[in-house]
Amino acid sequence: MVRESTAALSSRNFDSRFHFTTTLFLCYQFPHHRPVRESTTAPVLQPHPDSTGLIPTPRKLHRHARTHEALFVMGGAVKLVLAGDLFLLTPGDYVNIPSGTPHGYEFADHHGKLLSWTFGGNAAEAYGVLGSAYPGTIYSEENSPVDWTVLNATVDTELLATADRHASGFAEKLRFAPNGAVPFVLASGEGERMIAADQLYTILGNQTHSDGAFIALLTEGPIGPAIPRHQHETVTELFHCIQGQMEMFAGDTYITLDAGDFLHIPPRTPHSFQLKKHDTRFLGFITPGHFEPFFRYLCEPCESYRYPLVPHPFLFDRVIQHLAELDLTILERPAGPPPDPVPAAAGN
Ligand code: FE
């Protein structure tokens, strides 16, 4: 169980099947991104054609042979090239980057902040190779050179030639991602939405998007009761509070997560969560991805982008009905009225 602040966040799980790493990095962590003070003379939210009419692609286009990467934008604006398309990422956007997909990005303003999750390969070790330990809680103003050539197969990264390209603007972000391990950018708030009681769950990445490696979920809701304590035999869960406050039970203790806090729950760890402020929002990454049906039993599909003011029924009975097929051990019954007494067997 790991709890760290966003000032320096990196957690690793060396499960041989589902190695994953989560990394948060800020716009100045890699100082050779495009200088951003140019925004004072030109709008940064539009592509800048150069004198030839070409739009420079973000630097350090690269791909990973074995690593599946997912990005979530926490702040600022980020230019991303993904499989040949140029995107302008803004907070709340989600990016799916299967292994082998050419991609590269640069921060377009001073508040760029990305959360990166990697699965299956060791590409996240590139940050340790490129950077150096830094004790500060805000980024350094120092712009020291970065030797990008250190990126190679030892950190599952292949640098690609940065080809300029013709483009008329930014590519459209998706409202709903197609199934399959394909690269995509999902616009903030979009995805497959569903309701459990008073909480809105949005599936950002389903298990098909990563060949079963993980699912990514955004959960939003008001102050409410704790979910029942439970544990998983093989499933690892990662909770990242991005707004509001939640209280987690993990192992044998309670832990409060405020915005920016992160909690890693390994398999066989009793846990639950409770939202302690209205409009709390947290990201969840769950690996492996075969736990996805749990949410389809617990939730009802919905079109709304908001959690309901009047809670829907809590469909935990549907979860109980399918318990045999889920990696889930319930350690307490849900909050609420006691269950109906079991009727006496006929003939007694
Ligand atoms: Fe769980």
Image (cartoon, rainbow, N blue to C red):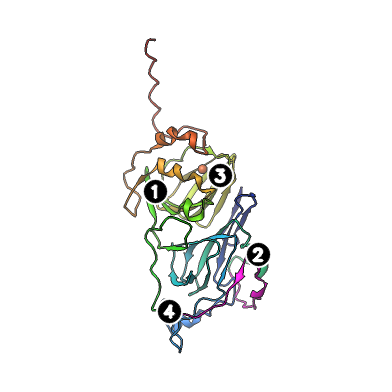
Q: Mark 3 points at which residue?
A: 235
Residue 163 magenta: yes
- Is the shortest distance between ligand 1 and the CB of mark 3 under 8 Å? yes
The mark lying in front, picked from 3 and 1, is 3
The earlier-in-sequence mark between 1 and 2 is: 2
Question: Disc 1 beta carbon < 8 A from ligand 1?
Answer: no
Residue 103 in picture, x, y percent from top left: 52, 69
Q: Is residue 316 visible?
A: yes
| Of callouts 4 and 2, the N-terminal one | 4
Q: What element carries label 1?
A: loop
Q: Which mark is residue 222?
A: 1
Q: Distance between the residues labelled 1 and 2?
A: 41 Å
Distance between mark 3 and mark 1 Cα atoms: 26 Å
Q: Which of 316 and 67 is in front in this view?
A: 67
* Between discs 3 and 4, the one toward the N terminus: 4
Residue 25 — which label? none
Badge 4 element: loop
- Please state which amino acid type lies under the numbered disc 2: Val
Query: Dot 2 corresponds to which residue?
Result: 155
Mark nearest the camera among 4 and 1 is: 4
The answer for how far apart the CA atoms under marks 4 and 1 are is: 39 Å
Q: Position of residue 192 (x, y in %)?
A: 38, 53
**The residue positioned farthest toward the top in the image shown:** 348
Distance between mark 4 and mark 2 Cα atoms? 31 Å
Tag nearer the camera, 4 or 2: 2
Measure how far apart labels 3 and 4 are at the Cα level: 42 Å
Q: Which range is magenta? A: 139-165
Count every numbered label the image shows and give the total. 4
